[in-house]
Amino acid sequence: MNTRTSMAQREEIIRRTIYVSDIDQQVYKLHILAFYLLTCWVVDCRICGDPKSILRFAFIEFTDEDGARTALNLSGTMLGYYPVRVLPSKTAIAPVNPTFLPRNDDEREMCSRTIYCTNIDKKIHKYSGGSNLFGACGLVQVYRLRLLGDYHHSTRIAFVEFVQVFTYLCSMDL
């Protein structure tokens, strides 16, 4: 496959992809898939944004361009408590590198107990919070905390692995 062919394929994928903004924080991937299933089969869906803000957005790729064009007509439709805005995407959804995916049941279970956090103040250190956090469900136990950062960014990121799966949902309030 040459460069021209791969660029043409990428452009075709972009034409099959839409950008959806103003997604209610109570709307999950399954809601979005059900919402757009009436237009065409969905190939991929990525939701992005802060769970404390209504400013979440998603990229949705369909099996064909007609499905994406039909989905554009759903702009202004209520999904949750807010009308969504639907536009053609300017980019394709980046594929997930399969080497980063869980390879067995233990890794899948670990992923189900882990969240990714951003905008963490650099004054926060691994041991300053202890092994417990207080969330919507009360005190939740942290199994493992991995803080990452560098000198180029003013904040840090973290991966927080909880002891129990249900505490993942409680952590959305932190």
Image (cartoon, helix red, strand yellow):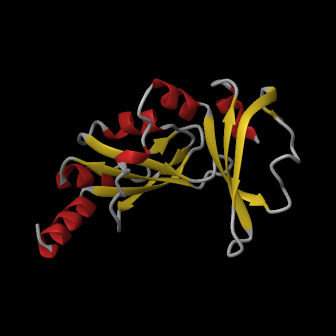
Quadrant of the rendered image containing residue 148: bottom right
Identify which residue, 55 or 14, lies in the foreground: 14
Instruction: Determine the residue positioned at 71% across, 61% down.
Output: 156
- In the image, is 10 to the left or to the right of 120? left
* Quarter of the rendering occupied by the C terminus: top right
For the image, the number of numbered tags is 0
Instruction: Determine the residue positioned at 57% across, 53% down.
Output: 49
Identify which residue, 72 or 92, lies in the foreground: 92
Instruction: Determine the residue positioned at 22% across, 67% down.
Output: 11
- In the image, is 108 to the left or to the right of 55? left
**Does residue 73 appear anywhere in the picture?**
no
From the top left corner, tell me how far across and down residue 54 is, in percent.
Answer: 62, 51
From the top left corner, tell me how far across and down residue 161 is, in percent.
Answer: 66, 36
Instruction: Determine the residue positioned at 57% across, 31% down.
Output: 110
**Does residue 164 appear anywhere in the picture?**
yes
From the top left corner, tell me how far across and down residue 122 is, in percent.
Answer: 80, 63
Identify which residue, 99 or 74, lies in the foreground: 99
From the top left corner, tell me how far across and down residue 137 is, in percent.
Answer: 78, 26
* Quarter of the rendering occupied by the N terminus: bottom left
Q: Is residue 5 above or below residue 61?
A: below
